[in-house]
Structures are given as structure tokens and as C-alpha cells.
Amino acid sequence: MATLRLKTTLLEVIHVWRSSLPEKAVARSGAPTKGWNTLINRTQRRLKGTEGGLWTRQARHSRCAVSGGFTVPNEMRAVRVHEVGDASKLRYEHGVPVPGPGPGELLVKNMFSGLNYHDTYTRSGLYPRPLPLTLGTEGGGTVVAVGEGVSDSRIGERVAYLAEGSYAEYSVTPTHRAVRVPRVVSLRHATCLMVQGLTAHYLTKSIFPLGPGDVCLVHAAGGGTGSLVVQMAKKLGATVIALSGSIAKAESAKRHGADHSLVYRDRDGGLVPWLVEEVRRLTPNGEGVHVAYDSVGKDTALHSLACLRPRGALILYGNASGPPPDIAPLALAEQGSCFMVRPKLHDYMEDEEETAWRGAELFGHPEGPHAGEPLHVLEPVLHATMPLERAADGHRMIEARKTMGKVLFEV
Ligand SMILES: NC(=O)c1ccc[n+]([C@@H]2O[C@H](COP(=O)([O-])OP(=O)(O)OC[C@H]3O[C@@H](n4cnc5c(N)ncnc54)[C@H](OP(=O)(O)O)[C@@H]3O)[C@@H](O)[C@H]2O)c1
């Protein structure tokens, strides 16, 4: 563990050092993007009368911009989607324009980009987006430029963030979607936790705040988000009934603290017929669970509902097997005045204050460590790290249910 951390820290030092080198090798000819033009014009205005300004010279001759000691090229490598479909539609391209940070935004030179199920939905067209686009939802790296209204002091900061377009060397993110990563936490660890860790946090602390005496049902509990929901629930004192698709995943859920860990699929991949009965049997007086955290959707939503006790909560937060079926309000009444919600992480990162709170709970305080402060609150399960150009392989792995935890791309 200590060796891994040292290796990661060394890599990060090299990453920051490389980010500050002149980018002649990567800076190609080509028109700067609109965003960069705005930034360059603004800087040129600031430098008016100082014709020898570094930015002006660099921008004119090498088609790159210098910001706070970092040299940013106009073009980069990125994974792009031009038409929706299967994993073969992902294209690793050179010469993609580097986006410019708009007002309230940070430009990040990425070290890691995380693979999330969400990316497969964007790629397949389940979540429609205008095309072409650069794929990705989360990343981790160093801030190399800032947009209007953001203090220059943020340049050089290590952040993990949420933003579309993170399968790339550079991405922009609004400040309220970025978490400052404390010195003692590696970018690898922080990127692993950005979407899945923050999701586990808002599910267990905000939507249905868990506490001692609560019993919760966690689906795909050996998976990326599920394993973190198990850990959060245990830290909050709840009893956890974990469901997984294989023995290996069920054992992993148990290692993360699940009180009961069941394999809910048979050999053919179908749902076991005793699922609801067994879950209810594990709850006090067979009353059912207080809350079901269901990321599987189509295959399991109705079973999750049937596992609830009166006034329980059905949290349908994912579609791993397909979108969940429509559930009529009357079905909630019949189950015992139950609640149902289909939440998404973005709504629980409303402003910088909320994001910083969740980040500090997961990573520790940015200025940490302080005496007694918990660090590395959650231990992400890292399934694999692979180069960004192999993004399509990562998509195939997660869709074939072959992953057990997070897949990270090295940029
Ligand atoms: N709403 C939000 O804020 C939010 C945030 C994060 C993630 N999510 C959603 O949560 C879901 C899980 O995401 P994740 O990143 O944590 O992935 P993951 O759990 O690491 O992987 C998905 C898991 O889903 C299970 N699964 C069940 N049926 C499946 C099927 N037909 N095909 C593929 N997988 C199936 C598999 O576990 P078993 O073999 O154990 O069944 C699989 O390992 C996704 O739908 C994602 O979009 C939502």
C-alpha cells in the first residue's frame, strides 16, 4: 500500500512538472478554439503595451497559451463519439481542440479519467447528447487555467471533478463540480471516488440518512458504487443486506462490511425465485428493509419494492440491466405508504459549499491532515487501470459485468 502511494505521488509530481514544460511537441498548427481565443484576447488586453508578453509571443508562434507557468496547447488527444452505438464507436483522436475555460470554470490537465456506466449510456444513445462529443464524466488532474471570476490562485491545484468530456488530456469543469484533493490523498484514489464515492455519500447521508437500527438493501454490492454504499452504510451504523451477481462479488461485499451477502442470480443469469422472501427473513420480524438502494433497475426494481417495510424508501439510482419499469403511485400505497425517488448526483452538488462538504467527508480537509481527522474514509475497489486509448475495452468489460469495482484510464 505504502509503495503504491509513493509510486502514485511520484507519478503526480512528474505529471505536474510535465504540465509546466513547453508543449512544442504537442502544439500543432490549427485555429485556437473559441474559448481559448477569448482567454487569449483577455490576456492580450491585460498585457496591452507590453508587446513582449509571454502569452502573446507563444500564442502567435507555437499556437499554445501560457497560464500561471503552465503551457497549454491548442490541440489534444481525446476519445470521441461521432455516432451512437456499441463500444466500437469510440474513437481515440489526435488534434482535438483544447476547450477554453468559461466564466466560473477551471481547465484541468488530466492524469486520470474514470469509467462510469453513464458513459456507456451516452455512447449508446440511452442518454441523448448532441454529437460529436468527447466522452467522459469524471477526472482528476491539475488546474492549468481558470475562467473569468475564478481566482488565479487555483492554478496548480490538484482536483478531482465531474464534467462531460473527461476522456481527454484537458477538460473544463465548473468550480462547483470540482473537489480540491488534499496533499495526502493520491489523484488515483480521489478520481476513483469522485462519481461513485460522492454518490454513495448523497444516497446514505442526504436522500435517506441512515443510522443505527436501519436495515438497507444494496444491489450490485460488489460493484463500483455498490461497494461504497456498503461501506458508507456500515460507517453510519446501519445493517446491510448485500446482493451480488457472483460469489466473488458477494465475498467482496462481505469484506467491505455487509452483514448478509447474497448471490441473487442463478447460473443462467436469471433472478433467484426466493429473493424477496430471503431478504425479508433477514430483517427484524420479517418486516422488510427501511431502504433499497437499487442500481440494477429493470431486472430488480419490483423486487426491491416488495422488500420494503411500511414507509420504506425505494431509491432507483441506476439502469445497469436497463431502465426500471414504471411503478404506479398506488403500488407505493399498497406496499405501505412507501417513497420512491430516481435521483442523480448533479442535483446533490448544487454549489461549491455542498461539493466541498461532501469532498471533505470523503477525502479529509483540503488543508489536512489535522489531528484526529478521518482520512481515506472509503476504500474504493480498483478493478483495473488502463491507457485512455483502450477506452473501448473498458466499456466492453463493464457491459459484460466483468468488472468488480472501478476502471480508471491513465491519460
Ligand atoms: N444516479 C446517480 O447519481 C448514479 C451515480 C453513479 C452510478 N449510477 C448508476 O448506477 C449503476 C451502476 O453503476 P456503477 O458505475 O457503480 O457500475 P458497477 O456497479 O461497477 O457495475 C454494474 C453492476 O451492475 C450489475 N448488473 C446487474 N444487471 C446487469 C446487466 N444486465 N448488465 C450489466 N450489469 C448488470 C452487475 O453487478 P452484479 O453482477 O453484482 O449484478 C455489474 O457489475 C449504473 O446504472 C450507473 O449509471 C447512478
Image (tube, rainbow, N blue to C red):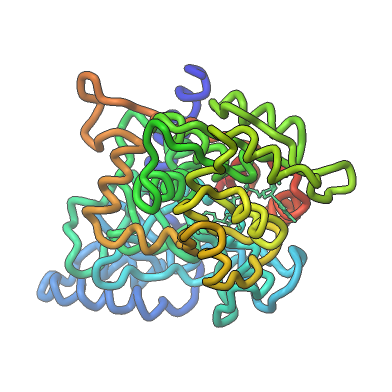
Residue placed furthest toward the right: 268
Q: Position of residue 21 (x, y in %)?
A: 39, 48
Q: Position of residue 285 (x, y in %)?
A: 56, 34
Do we see residue 395 in this rendering?
yes
- Image check: 384 left or right of 358? right
Which residue is drawn at the image coordinates 62% and 29% (left, top)?
A: 260
Splitting the image into 4 quarters, where does residue 123 fall?
bottom right
Which residue is drawn at the image coordinates 24% and 20% (left, top)?
A: 372
Which residue is drawn at the image coordinates 52% and 63% (left, top)?
A: 76
- Image check: 411 left or right of 247? left
- Image check: 278 left or right of 16? right
* Image: 368 above or below 346: above
* Image: 81 above or below 15: below
Q: Position of residue 330 (x, y in %)?
A: 54, 71
Instruction: Please tell me which residue lies in front, 390 or 227.
Output: 227
Do we see residue 27 in this rendering?
no
Splitting the image into 4 quarters, where does residue 118 fall?
bottom right
Instruction: Please tell me which residue lies in front, 218 or 394.
Output: 218
Which residue is drawn at the image coordinates 29% and 62% (left, top)?
A: 350
Q: Position of residue 177 (x, y in %)?
A: 34, 58
Q: How many marks?
A: 0
